[in-house]
Structures are given as structure tokens and as C-alpha cells.
Image (cartoon, rainbow, N blue to C red):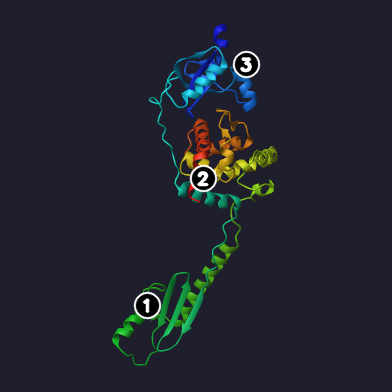
Amino acid sequence: MDHKSKTWTVVHFDDDDTVEAVPSIWIHGDQCLWPPYNHDKLQKAIQNGEMNSHWPSHKITLFKDARFRDYSTARSKARKAEVTSDLNSDDGKNKRQRKKKFMSSSESESEDNRVLSQFRKKLPTPPKKKSRLSLEVSRPTSNTLTLVDANVTIEISESQPRGQPSATSSSNSSCNNLCTHCCTKNSKNKDNKTTLFVIKDICCDILAKVEKLQTSEPVNPIPGNLLNQVGIDFPMTTMEELSIFEEFFKNEEKYTVLVRMFSKMGGSTTGDFIRRCLAPIISNELAMKFSFIGRKEKENFSVICLSKAIVEAADKMPFIKDKKETESAIGSWLKRGKARLEHSEKNK
């Protein structure tokens, strides 16, 4: 056990496809411990071989002949393993071919801009335009009643008075049939004035119900956007802006509102949900400075409250299986920051 504590082993982390040199005592089978520290503290822990069994563990793949007695050699081998599958290989024959995933402009730019505008200004849905009800009666050859409600028009014509000759038998037939939708089957035998009064009462009832719906308060109105109170522009581009953001949301009440806002972002997949949450908040330049747990000499994203709020909101999404799936999607989004930035600059 003593000889193992003074050695470092080069391992491949399967969840985010990275290679690191770690103290051998961190490795247990196909699992490796990884401390949730920032970059400086993490490097000291690796070099000094610190150990804490309560650290989170991640699935790894071991290389052949990958254990070394000094950290500098192990770190050099880890860098070589980033581009080759063999620690001892010097040529490029065994280079691992990585498939670069490029997001289309519709997914990276248009979608991000759409989500940003949606995220910045969440207001209650305005009431629908008030429909007008009109009751018109014209009296040329025959008396006609027109009821207009939105896209529905009902016309009711009065038959000519008794004793007045009709033009054709077909006109008498049409006058008798026009009222069948609003009156009873025998309405042609009823007094026309009574029919008009009945329809007028119906119109008044409909108008009253429409006005009541228009004046009713919306259910569960969306709260004001708390991001406008932070005092910085979004998406954030510097670590200083991120520090202001973190300090603002240390307040428990504000943090709860942030989680609720993220939980309303929606999405069809885990990756889509993460993009909707992160794209309006941090720029690609800032994303390039992070990995989810701080590997490859980058900052640890998992320890900041922005990450914790998104993970907590993801628990409310029905299409996300577990916390591990959310963390993997966040790490993948951060890793693609450079590709998104290059793609954006290329299309300018």
C-alpha cells in the first residue's frame, strides 16, 4: 500500500473523454476518486497524493504500463495519451480519431438568440383581442338579422309579410330554411319579432361571458425576471461578472427563484434543456475556461451555484433520468464551447 501511495497513474475518464495523471491511491478497480476543488487546490492534492474516501468517483479506463514514480513523468505521458492510444508511442499511427460535433447555426446561434430573448423578458401572455359582437337588421326586400362573433356569422331572414306576393317559390323556401340553426324546426310558423328578441338575449349572454373571460386574472402569473437585478450584462464573458452573479445568488430566496426560472426553460432532450439554460447566461469564451469537475487545468464548474441551480431544476424535467445524465450534458456543453465560438466567427 505504501509503494502505491507514492506513484501516479495515467487514466482515461470515460464520462468526458479526458486523460489525467492521478495518484494511484485514488484508483479502485474501474473507478477513480476526484476531489471537488478549484484548479489550484486540485493540483496540490494531485501532487501531494492527498486522499479522502468521501470524494465523488468516476468511471475510468486504465492504460497499459501507466504507473510512474514521479508526477512530472506521469503528467507528460498523460498529455501524450491525449492524442495517441499508447503512452509509449511516438508516431501518429494510433491517433484516436475524434468526431467533432458541430451544431448548426439554427441550433447554436438562432436558437440561442431566441432563448436569450425568451429568458430576459418573461411576461404574462396578453389577453386575446376583444371580439366584437354586432347585431344588424336590414330591411330591403326581406328582413335580415346578422350575428357576427369572431369568425362565425349567422344570418336570419324574415319572410315577407302576409298578403304580399312573393317573387318566386324558391325565395319562399330559402326564407323558411334560414332559421333552422337558431330556432326550432317550426320557427317559420312563429312570430318573427319573438325570434329576434330570443336571439338578442343570446347575444347579450355571449357578450357578458366574453367580457368576463377578458377581465379575469391569469392563473399563476410569471414573476419578474430576477436576472435584471444582478447588475451585469448577459451572457457573462468574464470571471469577474461570474463572481458578481455568484455573490448575488448566495441569497437563499433569490437562489430558489433562479431554480424555478430554469425549471421553466423546457426542452425536448437533456442537451436541449442544458443549452436553453446556459446559452443565455455564459458566453462561449467563458465556457472554455471550465470543465464540469475541473480537469485539464480548467476551473471546476460543478462547485458554483449556477451549476447547482441547473442540476436542481433538471430534477423536475420528466425526460431526464438522473443527476448523472444532467452533469454529463453540462460537461459536454462546456467542452463544445471552442467549437461553437469558431463556428460563430466563421459565419460572421
Q: CA distance from mark 2 to mark 3?
A: 44 Å
Q: Residues within 10 Å of mark 2 (few under 14, many from 20)?
A: some
* Residue 317 can be seen in this image: no
**Location of residue 241 with respect to 71 vertically, above or below:** below
Q: CA distance from mark 3 to mark 1?
A: 94 Å
Screen quadrant of the N terminus: top right
Residue bearing the label numbered 3: 48
Front in this rendered view, residue 92 or 34: 92
Rendered location of residue 237, percent (x, y):
62, 43
Rendered location of residue 314, percent (x, y):
54, 38
Question: Nearer the observer, disc 2 or disc 1?
Answer: 2
- Position of 82 with respect to 208 (left or right) is left
Front in this rendered view, residue 150 or 347: 347
Rendered location of residue 263, percent (x, y):
56, 42
Q: Which mark is residue 178?
A: 1
The amino acid beneath tag 1 is: Leu
- Report the residue at 59% width, 23% height from top: 35
Secondary-structure class at tag 1: loop
Residue bearing the label numbered 2: 266
**Location of residue 291 with respect to 215 vertically, above or below:** above
Rendered location of residue 274, percent (x, y):
52, 40
Q: Residues within 10 Å of mark 3 (few under 14, many from 20)?
A: few
Q: CA distance from mark 2 to mark 1?
A: 50 Å
Secondary-structure class at tag 3: helix
Front in this rendered view, residue 69 or 41: 69
Question: Nearer the observer, disc 3 or disc 1?
Answer: 3
**Location of residue 74 with respect to 330 vertically, above or below:** above
